[in-house]
Image (cartoon, rainbow, N blue to C red):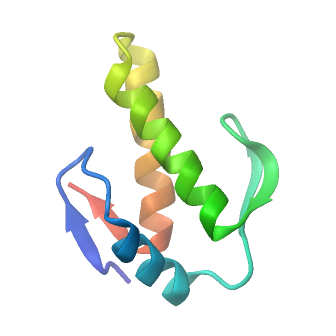
Amino acid sequence: MIRYSMTFGVMPTRAQFDECWEREVVGQFAFGNDERVGTCELSQDELWEELNAAHSQWVETTEDDEWEETGSWMSSVLYCLGIEWI
């Protein structure tokens, strides 16, 4: 269920992220063969840190392919939590 709709590229606040995490995630957030993080499970704090690192990378990049790939990755992860970028 979508809890927040945000402009593409706008990160949720930590409070919004935490609210969505508590509603959608049981345990850890799992990735399988992900190009960015590989196969792993991230805790709430680890995922928040990875999203912020990706966002910083996204803001700073000048490469179109990297910009699109990183933005798509963040959008997909946030969508799983109930946060939609539009």
Q: Is residue 44 above or below residue 72?
A: below
Q: How many marks?
A: 0
Q: Position of residue 45 (x, y in %)?
A: 62, 64
Tell me the quarter of the picture where residue 35 sits: top right
Q: Residue at x 45, y 27 (%)?
A: 57
Q: Quadrant of the C terminus?
A: bottom left
Which of 12/30 is in front? Answer: 12
| Residue lying furthest bottom | 23
Q: Position of residue 84 (x, y in %)?
A: 30, 63
Which of 29/76 is in front? Answer: 29
Q: Residue at x 52, y 78 (%)?
A: 21
Tell me the quarter of the picture where residue 33 sits: top right
Q: Quadrant of the N terminus?
A: bottom left
Residue 34 located left or right of residue 62: right
Q: Position of residue 3 (x, y in %)?
A: 30, 81
| Residue lying furthest top | 63
Q: Residue at x 39, y 10 (%)?
A: 63
Which of 49/5 is in front? Answer: 49
Q: Residue at x 17, y 53 (%)?
A: 7
Q: Is residue 7 above or below residue 21?
A: above
Residue 85 located left or right of residue 82: left
